[in-house]
């Protein structure tokens, strides 16, 4: 398990990284935390000619408040989701999801931007972008733009960031005091990819759900919002009837693919169970 | 066969501070940090168990945080401070953990042990008195095929207790 | 039972929990594993592997690979066949078994996906892998036999076209009276079971450095193995090098569990590559290679019937075990031992007369299976114990009650099982009672029923077991295998009065060296730190079987004990001459020769060593001090030293998700004389966790074309710390009278019954749903399916 030979370039600015990629075309890859990319290289599933290391680009670091948004630099490590006070205060769903992301040493190195850019449908953070209604900042040849998470995830490992473009930051609408979150997943072992996972963020008023975003992972080719389920619980109090309606609505929200270990019907069943449990918890705090 | 000498694979000179000492070596960009430590620097206490971040045998401290040495390339660590089991042993930083692992036989073949110790060291530096569940959680990425984990958990818990007792002794006026 | 030595005198180490002297090195990262070894001029091997489970090799093109800078050799099957003789994994005592001869690399046909086809030797592993990408091989696909049942169907294509069927071996046992017992039974229990394939997954992968010196005609192999002498013999015979010119060194080994005592094609090839090149060649299986080339184990389908009378007494069992072993039988220990032990161990704890079993071992296009920790035991135990629980449920007996009624009584020994195993002395009744106490069984039952009211589904499972340890030549030797059942030790008093013991049993972390030093120190009468134990080098230790099948303590320990007693006698003989005493009037305590009666120190053994080595002129004429002795010991008496015990576990099943949480596990274990209780507990715990892995997580999953689907450490689920429970252990000590030491083995007991226990506990939890599980691993999918949840 040794990677094919490649060249290495360390970039110190976003422009430098983009230029390096542009001059090498399809043969270049950015590396951030590398916790998914390095095994892919070791397995020779990917064999770029040049690796562009973005870990030293200062402007990709840091968590800051920008008005109604929390800006999380793409290089923010998973472990910082657990320790950064601004995240706990303004994006608590990321704080809640973080302990489920792999293992401590992976979290020390893996980055939020890398996870979102890879868009692994079984990963926690990409799905949480949907639940948070986050925006992903992308730098490319034509400058920078922000893409809503709803438009960002296109297909399996395919996103609105074109090859050669760089995810530079995540913008999360700041968490407000009338909002509630819930997160959980069903994984065989701690830190494994979940058989199914779900995070949600609701806006409540007087015990009623004004609005809610529910996002699943490990249910298909992309992280997936459960829009029908959201509709089923919006506008009212969370009770057994609404929970049941939301669970039933998952049939139209999710279409898990065949896999050798978890049949689609089982995954859908687990998604319903998980949704029921999370909505039950949400109902208690709404 | 061509009589020409083929172009050699690109080599990069990297410098680290390994176990407190400045070190320079030549690596190919594709050399992982674990291969560099083991082969170029002969620090064979760091082990390669899966080369994909699933077993924890290759954990080292990079700028003070435990990372998988198989999940980064040596060139990426240029300029970094790296501590391996050899350095942590020599500094005495984990002497209490090592002694407790030994006393309780919290190891058998020893192949996972350096990674376990580095992880335990980090856990205890973050969390003074972790519960057994927190210890097991922290070890959730460290595979041990021999022990059944219980003695490892016991050893870490005992060290946490001993360190806490020592800290409270220091803190309280005699 | 009187202890061998009391624990209250100096140097009484037998029965004492002392830390392992050699563990400190490992804790400091100073272990020296084969993966760490680098020799001057060493090259690295990598193997091209077959993508197909069964195919003919039509054409290979290696020119581009050979031309790559840094590549020293690209070797084909034909290249190695010129220097290596083929091997066949059959043994004579398995009557009628067949298997195809094997070579390091195939000549024209591959028989499993992942089989090594060609070898590249290069300056680095990375360059060798670069070269693999330049090789092209044309394969013509052949029908692949993947499924166990498919392999057994008549008319199915053959795994080996030269063979007459896919059957490797069949065996039958019949003690008589089975049909009559079933005809008269009050109840008949029937069940079918399936057991997934799993694999040992040592953390250090297989590793070998072969170093052939053509000028000296000497082969040195640094080999991560349990059995250096076995490999010395094999390398010598298959490469036609005189045995004395083959040296096998097994340094620190990163776990083995049976994995590292079998012949692997790559390992044989690496020896050949070193011979072809005259340079050291290293091969370390990477983790992906491990999954497709290490032995697998289990993979059984068992049909079982049990006849019981109206009181719940077992009358008879009738079982059929079908197992698939890959495309050929493993060398030199074969792949049929597991099935053989399954049919012989079923029912072993119980007192009944009528037993019939049939075993069918078939070929398929998967990697070879062979002996992995607790060979056959987990299957025999799960089948037996589940059947006993089903019987208990049928007539409304508690699981403890039905076992108490049926286990062989502790006062019935010696006796034999209906399958012909002879038991010297077991302790099922006392173990059963002890387990009930340590589990606080009645309280657990009360808690279970209270929680059930609240929709929390917990289960309690228990499983008795019998374990085979200390095998005699009846195990392999009688079948013609050059696998020793004896061990040898050479023990010396050094000139400075310390003791050095070179012994043929080996260390893989279980503490062999520690217990040998305890036994030697105890028997000689000196501090443990003055005993140095040396293992794992054929050039240094006497010949012996080494460490497998739980023989290290029982056989290796007895060897060391006898050797130490011999040396002690020799030391005392010299001491008696020096002190003008009778040897019988002297003893050794703490390195001092003392008056046996008064314990008055007379002379340090260091002084005896000094006199014997440097001033022999001061000894009476004719005295030749023998301060080095060698001793060999082979077990006699019972063919195996059986051990026994019982395990219990407490689990919680999430009936909505199918997830199972292991809450607590309990073991009562009787391995005879315990040398180091802490190490025994560690063996038991580690063994239990491997059994729990099998119960819930581990399975090699294959696709229809014979591709391993989960062959990485991210996809093959091994048990990790978070999911494993704390394990409570208690001991009963029934020493074997076959040896002075009285020790039996303990390494496999944990694995033997853990999965059976969980199977029973999960079924107990599912009882209110009238759902039942009869397959391991018990995955969420299987639980939800049983519950009809999707």
Image: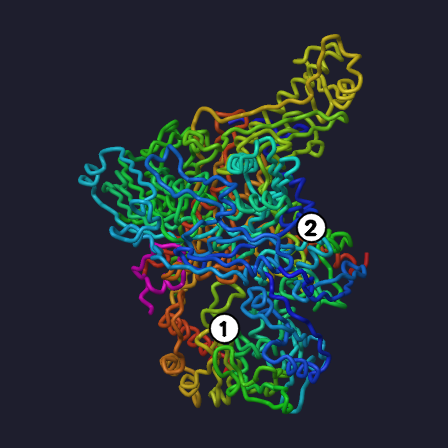
Q: Does the magenta segment cover residue A282?
A: no
Residue A186 in the image: x percent, y percent? 47, 69
Chain letter of disc 2 in the image? C
CA separation in Å, label 2 and label 1: 36 Å
Q: From the image, tell me which residue sits under label 2.
A: C29
Q: From the image, tell me which residue sits under label 1.
A: A122
In the image, residue C7 above or below residue C659: above
| Helix, strand or loop under label 2 | loop
Coloration mode:
rainbow
Which residue is rendered at x = 46% and y = 56% of the image? Answer: C114
In the image, residue B148 above or below residue A25: above
Which residue is rendered at x = 60% and y = 41% of the image? Answer: C221
- Asked if residue A278 lies left or right of residue C564, the reply is left
Image quadrant where residue C422 sits: top left
Image quadrant where residue A142 sits: bottom right
Which residue is rendered at x = 54% and y = 84% of the image? Answer: A132
Please rate how many residues cluster around mark 1, counting C-alpha atoms within 10 Å: few if below 14, some from 14 to 19, many from 20. Answer: many
Q: What is the span of residues highlighted in magenta in the rendered image? A: C769-790
Please rate how many residues cluster around mark 2, counting C-alpha atoms within 10 Å: few if below 14, some from 14 to 19, many from 20. Answer: many
Residue C781 in the image: x percent, y percent? 38, 64
Residue C154 in the image: x percent, y percent? 25, 50
Chain letter of disc 1 in the image? A
């Amino acid at each position: 398990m040794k990677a094919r030979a490649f060249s290495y370039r360390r970039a110190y600015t976003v422009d430098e990284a983009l230029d390096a990629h542009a001059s090498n075309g399809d043969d270049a890859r950015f590396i951030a935390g590398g916790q998914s990319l390095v095994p892919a290289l070791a397995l020779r599933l990917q064999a770029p000619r040049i690796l562009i290391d973005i870990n030293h680009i200062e402007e990709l670091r840091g968590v800051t408040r920008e008005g109604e948004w929390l800006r999380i630099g793409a290089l923010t490590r998973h472990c910082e989701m657990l320790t950064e006070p601004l995240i706990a205060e303004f994006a608590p769903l990321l704080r809640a999801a973080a302990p489920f992301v792999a293992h401590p040493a992976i979290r020390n190195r893996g980055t939020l931007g890398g996870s979102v850019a890879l868009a692994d449908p079984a990963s926690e953070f990409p799905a949480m972008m949907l639940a948070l209604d986050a925006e992903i900042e992308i730098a490319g040849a034509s400058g920078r733009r922000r893409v809503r998470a709803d438009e960002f995830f296109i297909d399996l490992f395919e996103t609105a960031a074109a090859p050669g473009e760089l995810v530079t930051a995540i913008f999360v609408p700041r968490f407000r005091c009338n909002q509630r979150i819930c997160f959980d997943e069903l994984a065989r072992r701690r830190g494994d990819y979940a058989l199914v996972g779900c995070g949600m963020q609701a806006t409540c008023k007087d015990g009623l759900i004004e609005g809610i975003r529910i996002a699943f992972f490990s249910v298909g080719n992309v992280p997936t919002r459960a829009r029908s389920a959201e509709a089923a619980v919006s506008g009212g109090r969370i009770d057994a009837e609404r929970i049941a309606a939301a669970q039933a609505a998952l049939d139209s929200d999710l279409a898990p693919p065949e896999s050798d270990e978890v049949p689609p019907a089982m995954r859908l069943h687990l998604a319903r169970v998980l949704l029921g449990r999370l909505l039950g918890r949400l109902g208690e705090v709404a | 066969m061509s009589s020409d000498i083929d172009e050699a694979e690109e080599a990069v000179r990297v410098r680290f501070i390994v176990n407190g000492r400045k070190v320079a070596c030549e690596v190919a960009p594709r050399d992982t940090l674990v291969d560099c430590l083991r082969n170029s620097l002969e620090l064979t206490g760091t082990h390669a168990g899966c080369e994909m971040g699933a077993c924890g045998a290759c954990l080292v401290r990079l700028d003070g945080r435990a990372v998988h040495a198989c999940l980064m390339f040596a060139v990426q660590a240029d300029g970094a401070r790296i501590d391996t089991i050899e350095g942590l042993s020599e500094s005495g930083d984990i002497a209490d953990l090592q002694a407790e692992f030994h006393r309780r036989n919290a190891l058998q073949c020893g192949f996972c042990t350096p990674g376990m110790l580095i992880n335990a060291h980090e856990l205890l530096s973050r969390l003074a008195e972790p519960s057994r569940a927190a210890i097991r959680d922290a070890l959730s990425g460290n595979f041990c095929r021999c022990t059944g984990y219980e003695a490892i958990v016991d050893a870490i818990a005992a060290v946490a207790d001993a360190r806490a007792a020592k800290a409270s002794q220091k803190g309280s006026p005699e | 039972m009187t202890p061998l030595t009391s624990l209250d005198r100096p140097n009484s180490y037998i029965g004492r929990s002392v830390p392992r002297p050699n563990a400190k090195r490992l804790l400091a990262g100073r272990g020296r594993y084969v993966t760490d070894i680098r020799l001057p001029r060493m090259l690295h091997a990598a193997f091209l592997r077959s993508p197909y489970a069964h195919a003919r090799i039509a054409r290979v093109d290696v020119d581009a690979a050979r031309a790559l800078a840094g590549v020293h050799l690209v070797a084909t099957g034909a290249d190695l066949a010129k220097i290596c003789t083929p091997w066949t994994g059959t043994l004579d005592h398995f009557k009628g078994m067949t298997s195809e001869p094997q070579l390091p690399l195939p000549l024209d046909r591959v028989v499993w996906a992942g089989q090594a086809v060609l070898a590249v030797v290069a300056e680095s592993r990375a360059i060798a892998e670069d070269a693999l990408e330049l090789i092209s091989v044309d394969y013509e696909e052949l029908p692949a036999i993947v499924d166990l049942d498919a392999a057994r169907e008549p008319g199915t294509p053959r795994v080996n076209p030269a063979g007459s069927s896919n059957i490797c071996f069949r065996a039958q046992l019949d003690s008589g009276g089975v049909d009559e017992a079933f005809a008269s039974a009050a109840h008949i229990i029937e069940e079918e079971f399936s057991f997934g394939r799993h694999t040992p997954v040592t953390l250090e992968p297989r590793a070998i450095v072969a170093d052939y010196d053509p000028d000296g005609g000497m082969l040195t192999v640094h080999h991560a193995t349990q059995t250096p002498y076995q490999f010395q013999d094999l390398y010598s015979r298959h490469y036609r090098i005189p045995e004395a010119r083959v040296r096998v060194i097994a340094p620190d080994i990163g776990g083995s569990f049976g994995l590292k005592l079998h012949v692997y094609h790559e390992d044989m090839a690496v020896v050949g590559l070193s011979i072809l090149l005259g340079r050291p060649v290293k091969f370390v299986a990477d983790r992906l290679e491990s999954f497709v080339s290490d032995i697998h184990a289990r993979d059984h389908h068992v049909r079982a019937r049990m006849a019981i009378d109206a009181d719940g007494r077992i009358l008879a069992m009738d079982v059929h075990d079908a197992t698939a072993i890959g495309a050929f039988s493993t060398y030199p220990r074969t792949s049929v031992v597991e099935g053989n032990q399954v049919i012989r161990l079923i029912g072993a704890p119980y007192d009944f007369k009528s037993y019939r079993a049939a075993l069918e071992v078939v070929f398929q296009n998967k990697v070879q299976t062979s002996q992995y920790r607790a060979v056959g035991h987990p299957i025999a135990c799960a089948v037996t114990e589940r059947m006993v629980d089903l019987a208990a449920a049928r007539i409304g007996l508690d699981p403890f009650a039905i076992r108490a009624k049926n286990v062989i009584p502790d006062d019935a020994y010696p006796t034999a099982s209906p399958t012909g195993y002879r038991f010297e002395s077991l302790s099922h009744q006392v173990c059963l009672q002890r387990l009930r106490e340590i589990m606080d069984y009645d309280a657990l039952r009360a808690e279970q029923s209270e929680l059930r009211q609240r929709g929390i589904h917990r289960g309690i499972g228990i499983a008795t077991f019998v374990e085979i340890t200390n095998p005699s030549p009846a195990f392999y030797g009688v079948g013609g295998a050059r696998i020793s059942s004896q061990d040898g030790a050479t023990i010396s008093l050094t000139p400075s009065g310390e003791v050095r013991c070179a012994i043929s049993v080996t260390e893989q972390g279980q503490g062999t060296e520690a217990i040998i030093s305890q036994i030697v120190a105890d028997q000689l009468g000196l501090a443990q730190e003055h005993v140095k134990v040396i293992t794992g080098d054929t050039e240094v230790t006497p010949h012996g079987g080494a460490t497998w099948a739980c023989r290290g303590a029982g056989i290796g320990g007895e060897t060391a004990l006898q050797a130490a007693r011999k040396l002690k006698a020799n030391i005392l003989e010299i001491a008696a001459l020096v002190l003008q005493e009778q040897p019988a009037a002297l003893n050794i305590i703490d390195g001092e020769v003392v008056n046996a009666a008064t314990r008055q120190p007379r002379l340090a053994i260091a002084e005896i060593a000094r006199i014997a080595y440097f001033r022999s002129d001061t000894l009476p004429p004719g005295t030749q001090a023998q301060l080095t002795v060698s001793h060999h010991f082979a077990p006699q008496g019972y063919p195996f030293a059986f051990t026994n015990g019982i395990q219990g576990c407490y689990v919680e099943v999430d009936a909505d998700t199918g997830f199972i949480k292991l809450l607590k596990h309990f073991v009562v274990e009787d391995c005879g004389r315990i040398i180091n209780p802490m190490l025994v507990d560690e063996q038991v715990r580690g063994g239990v966790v491997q059994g729990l892995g099998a119960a819930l997580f581990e399975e090699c999953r294959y696709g229809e074309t014979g591709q391993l689907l989960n062959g990485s450490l991210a996809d093959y689920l091994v048990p990790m710390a978070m999911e494993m429970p704390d394990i409570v252990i208690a001991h009963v000590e029934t020493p074997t009278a076959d040896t002075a030491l009285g020790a039996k083995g303990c390494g496999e007991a944990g694995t033997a019954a853990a999965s059976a226990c969980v199977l029973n506990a999960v079924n107990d939890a599912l009882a209110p749903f009238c759902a039942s599980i009869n397959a391991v691993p018990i995955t969420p999918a299987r639980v939800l399916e049983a519950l009809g949840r999707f």
